[in-house]
Amino acid sequence: MSAKVAIQKFSFPFSCAARLSQPDELTQKGCVQAKALALHDLQDNPIIREPNLVAVVEALVHDENRVQESQKSPPMAVAKVLDCAEASPSEVVCRRSAFEKLTVENEDQRPAAKRQLSSESAARTITVVKKSAVRKEAEEQRHLKLKPQRATPCPAAKGKRRCRKDLFTNSEVFHRVDSHAIRAGAELKEKCVYDVKTIAQSVTQGARNELERIRAIWVWLCHNIEYDVSGYLGHSEKVSSPEEVIATGRGVCCGYSNLCTEMCREVGIDCQEVPGHSKGIGYRQGQSLKNVKSDHLWNAVLLGGQWFLLDACWGAGRVDMEHESFVKRFDDFYFLTDPEEFIDSHFPDEEKWQLVDAPITQEEFERRVFKTSTFFTMGLKLVQPHHAHIVTDDGEANVCLGFSRPATFTYEITQHRDLLHCGASEQKESNNSSYGLLTVSHRSMKLQLLPPASGVYNVKVFARPETATTPLFWVCSFTVECPTPRAMEEIPENPFLSWGLQTAAGSLGVAGSSQGSEVAEVEEGVFELALKTSRPLMVLCELVHPQLEGTVAKRCLATQIQPNVLTCHVLCPLRGFYRLTVFVRDYEKTDLKFQNAANFLLHCKGKVVGLDELFPPNLGSVCGPGTRTTEAGLLKFSHTTAVLSTQQGKCNITFHNQRDLELHTVLSREEEKTLTLSRHLFCTYTDTKVTVSVSLPDAGVYRLGLYARIAPGGDFNPMCDFVLRNSCDQPCPPFPCVFSAWRKGCVLFEPRVGLLEPLSWVRFRVRVPGVQRVSVVGETRTDLKLNKSRVWEGEVFSGNGLQQLKLAAALGESSDMAVLMTFDIKQAVREE
């Protein structure tokens, strides 16, 4: 096979570690020889992503000692990628930008058959190296050791720079590598092994390429080295040498970076330490870094001809400065972080290590908003502001974040403290929400900050995925400078994180709202909220005002539950801001808990409702016709709203009782007056139609309760309540007192009042089906006559008021009569 053919046929997923010194070394004898099966397997290997790149595989031996050591441990294959097309002798050099694309997909995801074939092919591959080339490379390595130089980032390969997601889809592909590194680290620690080389080779055993080797080293560092908080604070001596860091299991940033560099060197990975500034512990918000010595070290590794950044110190956990302790929390974000995201928190001393297309200045780094790893892993985007320091405009500052997946947010605003990393990094609920308004829409979060006084404040934003049950994590920070606060009324705290419909509202069954997330201005002290639903729901509402007592607040709400709409009627007895919170659950799933679906901020600055105009104190949770009445077969209500108004003091409510349920009605204004109002209700049943007539004694607000006996012999269950508002100052008379003999089909036409004038003739007209005789009994007895319309009628003298008038009926020929109802007679005024 010719050299050109061999070059075109082979491609291995390894980065270049050396170069050919002369083009004549690319001979047929110096190229890799393999069987046809191996060639076929390599061509089918899914790891190879750029078949147009040419790879020449050459085993290198740095010196005689390395040759002897290789007999004890598996030799390391090193690959060089060269563009051999029309290459001149001066062009046959290490061009890292032309390396084959390094793939990070875990080989475990490949079909088992292909994995086996690839392994067998690799095992049968024979590498032949010219001795002269080996000696020449060994000599070059000796010269390099004599003159160590810091590597320089190579120019990016032609085309777009590869980012982290191009290397691996997610960290799950490293499950095998991570598990081995953690397990091997625990075993080495138990055996008190502190040798860098031994540890590096042990944790990378089984790694199939450079990416897996650096991953194993990074995971071992994050799980075995803790940040030396005591050394950082000066309470103890810092440890920095690799052996000391390993032995003590602690170190500061230079301990992590130095050890990472040494371990990478032991396994043939080009790794550099990068000094610079970071927004870690000790960083003071707003401080100038000009002429300030850099305080942090991290690493850069060369993979496939391209430099990538990583920080094991930040990946191992965080420092709790308040308790002067280290909190272990593995953070995968800082492994091969994309430079565009890394630059927000890490600013290298040398511009070339920013690795971005448009390097930023130190001043821009200082102004940039600090974003935690959670910010990026949640896919958040900063919309507003563009810098971390905000000056209020008319006492207001605004923050806006975008997101692609539903998320929950909250925030914390506190008096300014210099250190960025102070306070909690997690949040379970909102604090100081009265200093701002947080609203979450379909794809963005908006935070309107309203500092209470002049000064400088720290603002932390917290977030979590909508479906997560964990605490909310810190995602970004700002400082807010407020020269002049806005004169504002106190805003009630919102423990439910944001205003408007919650992001989970849709999954809870709430499809839309008549009110957005903005502040609702309440007119005339009355507000109505309507929520559209995708399925039947139950609802509970809560109203909060800084000066409103809970018992009074309950009388400010009336809720109506319909199959596709939830309606909440709100009364505002005080000026200022109110929080209206809505909780829902599925209507039929009584075992479920109510969950927060929406929170609205109401502002009442004009007319308010008087305390005597509030809803009745014993109002039920279900007002007006809705889901419950429909299920019971009570349909076609003449009034479909929960709140009715009358200017005459009278009203009639009609509906159909399809299931012929036994019904009961109650009229009340205050609980202690319930019984005295029973005469102001009158019910008429004809076929399926029911008419409830109301005659109100005074102006004011009343509750009309409707009950039904669902099961024979069972209790009466509440169906719904109506709120009746009467603006008539003239009292309406009561109805007659009705007895149990007054049953379905009976209709009273005249008189419709229960209090008659004395010494007067009163016309009676009544329908009583199935009776033989109907009489009115008072001081005398008057029998009514049955007309052609099957109505009993006649003229009756009321008397002087010494006796009630009783309307009675006889069911048969018997002289016994049942009292249907009684009428009172006003006392006659005696003339002197």
Image (tube, grey):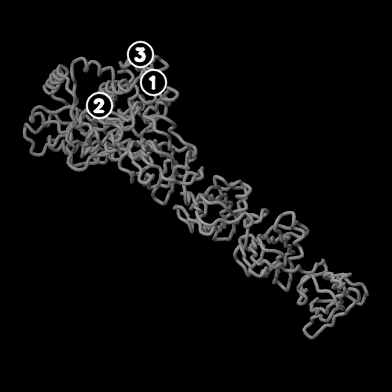
Is residue 636 at least partly visible in the picture? no
Give the side of residue 740 with respect to residue 396, left or right: right
Residue position for label 3: 237
For numbered disc 1, what is the local secondary structure? helix
Pinpoint residue 328: horizontal percent, then vertical percent: 42, 26
In the picture of the structure, the residue carrying the numbered disc 2 is: 274
Lower sequence index among marks 1 and 3: 1
Q: Position of residue 257 (x, y in %)?
A: 29, 23
Classed neighbour count for the residue bearing mark 1: other residues with Cα under 10 Å, few (<14), some (14–19), many (≥20): many
Q: Quadrant of the C terminus?
A: bottom right
Q: Nearer the viewer, residue 676 or 757?
A: 757
The N terminus sits in image quarter: top left
As helix, strand or loop, the secondary structure at mark 3 comes to loop
- Which kind of residue does numbered mark 2 sit on? Val
- In this view, the residue in front, 397 or 710, is 397
Dot 2: element: strand
Classify 661 as above or below 142. Answer: below
Q: Return the residue nearer the eye: 308 or 601.
A: 601
The residue closer to the viewer here, 750 or 572, is: 572
Give the CA distance from mark 1 to mark 3: 11 Å
Task: Please state the horizontal and vertical placement of residue 497, each as a whole percent of the image.
Answer: 48, 44
**Three-letter amino acid code of the residue under disc 3:** Glu
Q: Are marks 3 and 2 in contact (CB under 8 Å)?
A: no
The image quarter containing residue 716 is bottom right
Give the number of the mark in front: 2 or 1: 1
Residue named by callout 1: 229
- Number of other residues with Cα within 10 Å of mark 3, as a class: few under 14, some 14 to 19, many 20 or more: few
Mark before the other along the chain sequence, 3 or 2: 3
